[in-house]
Amino acid sequence: MKRTSSFLAIALCVAVLGLALSAGPAAADSSRSAALIEQTIAFHDPQGLWQEGVFRLVLEETRPDGPSRKTMLLVDNTSGRFEIATQRDGAQIDGVLADGGCEMRLDGSTQFSDEDKEKYRLTCERLEWLRNYYVYLWGLPMKLLDEGTVLDTDVLDTTYQKRPVQAVRVTYDLSVGSDIWYFYLDTETHALAGYRFFHDEAKGDGEYITLEGQIEAGGLRLPKSRSWFTNAEDRYLGTDTLVSLEILSP
């Protein structure tokens, strides 16, 4: 299974969440799980910077079947502006989403052939997908406040990667997505320890994600590295490492 196809379920889930960059919080819930998510967000973002901040992230993305690549992201959670700069097959790809429009550049030029457009997926739709994907995953656990998020009321005391954790089961309104997620939180610090998702929980499909280390900027703490594995085969899919995090505007 190619890595891009393994992201399909996440794309379906974040397509609405990523677009709702300025959406209000999820429905109020006094359950234990809601209180725990609040504690987790308080650990990672005690000053509430993520919701209205502007950030520059530099990532190193490695895959078992290809070379690693560096990707620069600019995320403006107030205006919805998103910029990406990355390389693919030796070509420099840059994209900007802002003010309801988009611009794609290939090796610095906005002029490219239909063949290159298809090869490098130089479309606004693809750029929107990338924004939704990156903003959702690197914005966790803060993105669990988005509208359409449904927290199970119960919290499961369990282990994840041989460490004691508390697990919160999360689903989404049908208008957002149909996948089932479990978020694993450290029992002492409430830090996000990892998560997994299923397309069909009874079949045990989907993937799980492990987190290691943290990068801190201005009090905001994001996981340093995120590694992906299949639930069924325990097959390694890749690792995304946050090389640097810069807050451009609180």
Image (spheres, grey):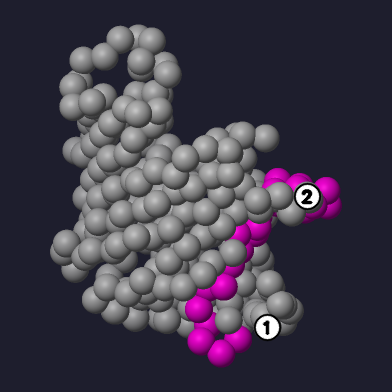
Residue 87: percent from left, percent from top = 34, 35
Residue 225: percent from left, percent from top = 47, 63
Residue type marked 1: Pro
State the SS at label 2: loop
Q: Is residue 225 left or right of residue 232?
A: left
Q: Is residue 242 left or right of residue 75?
A: right
Q: Which mark is residue 227?
A: none
Location of residue 57 with respect to 68 vertically, above or below: below
Asked if residue 194 lies in the magenta stretch, the reply is: yes
Residue under the point 54% across and 44% down: 63
The crowding category of the residue bearing disc 1, from other C-alpha atoms within 10 Å (few below 14, some 14 to 19, many at least 20), is some
Q: Is residue 1 left or right of residue 193?
A: right
Q: Nearer the viewer, mark 1 or mark 2?
A: 2
Q: CA distance from mark 1 to mark 2?
A: 23 Å
Residue type marked 2: Glu
First-in-chain label (1 vs 2): 1
Closer to us: 240 or 18? 240
Q: Which residue is mark 2?
A: 233
Q: Which mark is residue 164?
A: 1
Asked if residue 196 lies in the magenta stretch, the reply is: yes
Residue under the point 18% across and 22% down: 109
Location of residue 212 with respect to 1 vertically, above or below: below
Residue under the point 50% across and 78% down: 191
State the SS at label 1: strand
Occupied quadrant, residue 243: bottom left
Residue 213: percent from left, percent from top = 46, 73
Whether residue 124 is visible: no
The crowding category of the residue bearing disc 2, from other C-alpha atoms within 10 Å (few below 14, some 14 to 19, many at least 20), is few
Occupied quadrant, residue 85: top left
Quarter placement of the C terminus:
bottom left
Q: Which residues are magenta?
A: 187-209
